Image: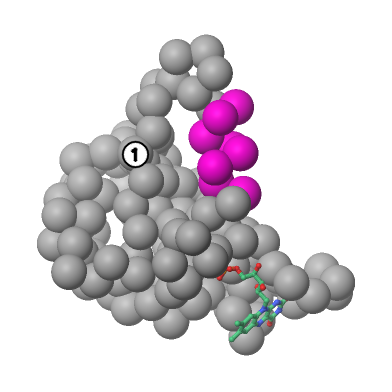
Amino acid sequence: MHLLIVSCTPRAKEKSNTDKILDELKKGYEYNGNTTETLYLYKRNEWESMREKFYENDNILFALPLYVECIPGIMAEFLETLKPKQNCNTKIGFLLQSGFAEASQLRCCESYYYETQPSG
Ligand SMILES: Cc1cc2nc3c(=O)[nH]c(=O)nc-3n(C[C@H](O)[C@H](O)[C@H](O)COP(=O)(O)O)c2cc1C
């Protein structure tokens, strides 16, 4: 199965904790022949082609750090540029990681995910 991954940190790949986690996740995911493609939101000049890939793909994972108890601003900005998908077979997952110990900080972001799911 092909998985489109969107890395939603504003940090460059070399400095991002999200991308360190993704590197390991991809090793496991691709081990038995699955494939991935990763898009990096910090590369703003590529957003047009990223939108096309979002529309074309059915299996999508948004990977993000918690920033001020919610999603990074760059991710909110990108999501707001997307049109609703017509294809109701699309499945969207989220990988959220954060720096502080209090798990309650993640709850606001968790609620946001449900709002982000494409409608039928
Ligand atoms: C501006 C900023 C805000 C942050 N806010 C939170 C927060 O509210 N809760 C938390 O647990 N971690 C917070 N963190 C920590 C990040 O979630 C953590 O360092 C994460 O691993 C960064 O991932 P990245 O390197 O891919 O951007 C914050 C970090 C930054 C830079």
Ligand 1 quarter of the rendering: bottom right
**Main SS of residues in magenta:** helix
Q: Is residue 11 magenta?
A: no
Residue designated by label 1: 37
The amino acid at mark 1 is Glu
The quarter holding residue 60 reads top left
Crowding at mark 1 (Cα within 10 Å: few <14, some 14-19, many 20+): few
Asked if the beta carbon under badge 1 is closer than 8 A to the nearest atom of ligand 1, the reply is no
Q: Is residue 17 left or right of residue 63?
A: right
Q: What residue lies at 44% left-to-right and 20% top-to-bottom?
A: 34
Q: Is residue 40 left or right of residue 34?
A: left
Q: Position of residue 8 (x, y in %)?
A: 44, 64
Q: Residue furthest top?
A: 32
Q: Is residue 90 visible?
A: yes
Q: Position of residue 63 (x, y in %)?
A: 51, 55
Q: Residue furthest front?
A: 14
Q: Is residue 26 magenta?
A: yes
Q: Which residues are magenta?
A: 21-28
Is 14 or 52 nearer to us in this picture?
A: 14
Q: What residue lies at 27% left-to-right and 38% top-to-bottom?
A: 57
Q: What residue lies at 52% left-to-right and 34% top-to-bottom?
A: 26
Query: SS at mark 1?
Result: strand
Q: Is residue 112 visible?
A: no
Q: Is residue 109 left or right of residue 115?
A: right
Q: Position of residue 27 (x, y in %)?
A: 56, 30
Q: What residue lies at 38% left-to-right and 77% top-to-bottom?
A: 74
Q: Position of residue 72 (x, y in %)?
A: 49, 77
Q: Residue furthest bottom?
A: 68
In the displayed structure, would residue 56 be above or below residue 31? Answer: below
